[in-house]
Image (tube, rainbow, N blue to C red):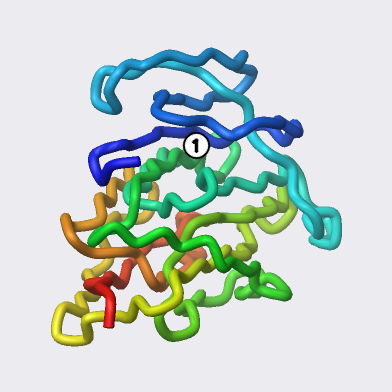
């Protein structure tokens, strides 16, 4: 698998899907069906359904939980989110790609619990030398907010390049579209989120690192 192999997903429903994609593009949307094809990432309009993971039902008073994880060995390299003002929630989409420098991060774990409380700030980083490859969220209609878990993966012998650490400013305004693309040669390692009680929405900041063998 090359570093140029990429996959795109949009999260909405929680339905189990089996199988591992290889060199195909995917686009995942609400109420969508699953299609496969060899189209490149930027031209792909293909559909797939979301994955339901363990522990989502532990999020009390929740609606429309989802669990997204990149195919094994791939990591998150793109995040997009559109805010729905009527429902006071966001629809998320994700892109996955091979990690830089031929890394194959397959040693993975999920956070044990949700990393944020309702209406409180979120500050999360993977443990050192792990990169983000998955996302669990549950949404509460009553609280108009989401709680999150994250999947972090590593490749033995690969470490962060600390001089290449980068943390963005908040890249979206409350109620506005969010677009994040991981810089070339880097991996996503952390996220910060601030809840806005007026708009009932979150602003997001992201942390990236270089990733290379020792």
The quarter holding residue 151 reads bottom right
- Side (left or right) of 208 relative to 124: left
Where does residue 201 sit, x and y in percent of width and height?
Answer: 48, 56
In front: 71, or 82? 71
Image position of 69 (left or right of 160): right
Question: Quadrant where the C terminus lies?
Answer: bottom left
Q: Residue at x 22, y 81 (%)?
A: 161
- Residue 77 position, x and y percent, is 33, 51
Does residue 97 appear left or right of residue 35 in this picture?
left
Vertical position of residue 136 compared to residue 34: above or below: below
The x and y percentages for residue 171 are: 25, 59
Q: Crowding near pointer 1: few (<14 within 10 Å), some, many (20+)?
A: some
**Residue at image coords 38%, 41%:** 95
Q: Residue at x 30, y 72 (%)?
A: 207
Q: In this figure, which residue is indicated by the disc labeled 1?
A: 84
Q: Quadrant of the N terminus?
A: top left
Closer to the camera, 67 or 23?
A: 23
């Amino acid at each position: 698998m090359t570093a140029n192999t990429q996959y795109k997903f949009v999260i909405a429903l929680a339905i189990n899907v089996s199988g591992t994609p290889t060199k195909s593009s995917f686009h995942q949307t609400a109420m969508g069906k699953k299609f496969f094809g060899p189209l490149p990432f930027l031209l792909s309009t293909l559909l797939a359904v979301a994955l339901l993971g363990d522990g989502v039902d532990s999020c009390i008073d929740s609606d429309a939980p989802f669990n997204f994880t990149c195919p094994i060995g791939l990591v998150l390299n793109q995040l997009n989110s559109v805010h729905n003002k009527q429902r006071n929630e966001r629809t998320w989409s994700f892109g996955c790609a091979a990690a830089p420098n031929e890394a194959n991060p397959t040693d993975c774990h999920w956070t044990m619990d949700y990393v944020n409380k309702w209406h409180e700030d979120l500050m999360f980083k993977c443990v050192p030398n792990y990169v983000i490859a998955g996302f669990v969220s549950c949404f509460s209609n009553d609280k108009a907010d989401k709680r999150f878990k994250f999947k972090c993966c590593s490749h033995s012998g690969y470490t962060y390049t600390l001089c290449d650490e980068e943390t963005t400013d908040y890249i979206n305004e409350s109620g506005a579209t969010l677009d994040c693309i991981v810089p070339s040669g880097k991996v996503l390692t952390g996220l910060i989120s601030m809840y806005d009680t007026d708009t009932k929405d979150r602003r997001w900041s992201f942390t990236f690192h270089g990733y290379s063998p020792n």
